[in-house]
């Protein structure tokens, strides 16, 4: 939570901003689950999101779906 705000950018994008970006993308739950586990860079900028290797596959999927369920940023 020190890296992601619920709505606005902190170190990484806000969860509501992520949800907005992938609103109509049916591949997003699987893609984001994989990025949560493996890390990511270059999609939102040049800051690296480190891999979250202790997060299991099913937990990563649940987290991705939760992120994607956030309402549009006000
Ligand atoms: C379990 C914890 C975390 C979850 C569920 C999570 C979730 C996400 C998601 C869904 C994205 C979007 C990826 C995309 O659009 O392709 C993202 C990106 C990002 N996250 Fe996280 N994150 C977590 C932990 C962290 C931590 C600890 C940091 C900072 C140290 C961080 C920093 C970032 C950054 C900088 C990006 C943008 C990466 C890029 O541009 O490709 N995240 N995160």
Image: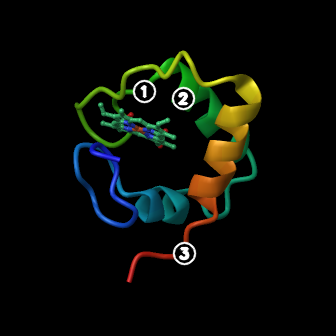
Q: From the top left corner, tell me how far across and down residue 24 is, in percent.
A: 67, 63
Asked if residue 18 is positioned above or below residue 49 in the image, the reply reads below
As rendered, which of 68 and 54 lies closer to the eye?
54
Q: Secondary structure under badge 3?
A: loop
As drawn, the label of residue 40 is 1
Query: Ligand 1 within 8 A of label 2's CB?
Result: yes
Quadrant in which the C terminus is drawn: bottom left
CB atoms at circles 1 and 2 under 8 Å apart?
A: yes
Q: Secondary structure under badge 2?
A: helix
**Number of marks in the rendered image:** 3
Q: From the top left corner, tell me how far across and down residue 5 is, in percent.
A: 33, 57
Task: Give the CA separation, mark 3 to mark 2.
Answer: 21 Å
Color theme of the render: rainbow
Left-right relation of 22 to 8: right
Q: Quadrant of residue 45?
A: top left
Circle 1 crowding by C-alpha within 10 Å: few under 14, some 14–19, many from 20: some
Query: Ligand 1 within 8 A of label 1's CB?
Result: yes
Task: Give the CA separation, mark 1 to mark 2.
Answer: 6 Å
Circle 2 crowding by C-alpha within 10 Å: few under 14, some 14–19, many from 20: some
As drawn, the label of residue 35 is 2
Left-right relation of 58 to 33: right
Quadrant containing ligand 1:
top left
Left-right relation of 64 to 3: right
Dot 3 corresponds to which residue? 71
Q: Quadrant of residue 6?
A: bottom left
Left-right relation of 2 to 25: left
Circle 3 crowding by C-alpha within 10 Å: few under 14, some 14–19, many from 20: some
Residue at horizontal 45%, vertical 19%?
51
Q: From the top left corner, tell me how far across and down residue 73 is, in percent.
A: 41, 76
Asked if residue 24 is positioned above or below residue 37 in the image, the reply reads below
Residue at horizontal 34%, vertical 31%?
42
Q: Secondary structure under badge 1?
A: loop
């Amino acid at each position: 939570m020190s890296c992601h705000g619920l709505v606005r950018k902190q170190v990484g994008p806000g969860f509501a901003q992520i949800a907005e970006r992938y609103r109509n993308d049916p591949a997003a739950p699987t893609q984001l689950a994989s990025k949560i586990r493996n890390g990511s860079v270059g999609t939102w900028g040049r800051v690296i999101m480190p891999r979250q290797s202790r997060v299991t596959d099913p937990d990563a999927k649940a987290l991705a779906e939760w992120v994607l369920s956030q309402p549009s940023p006000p």
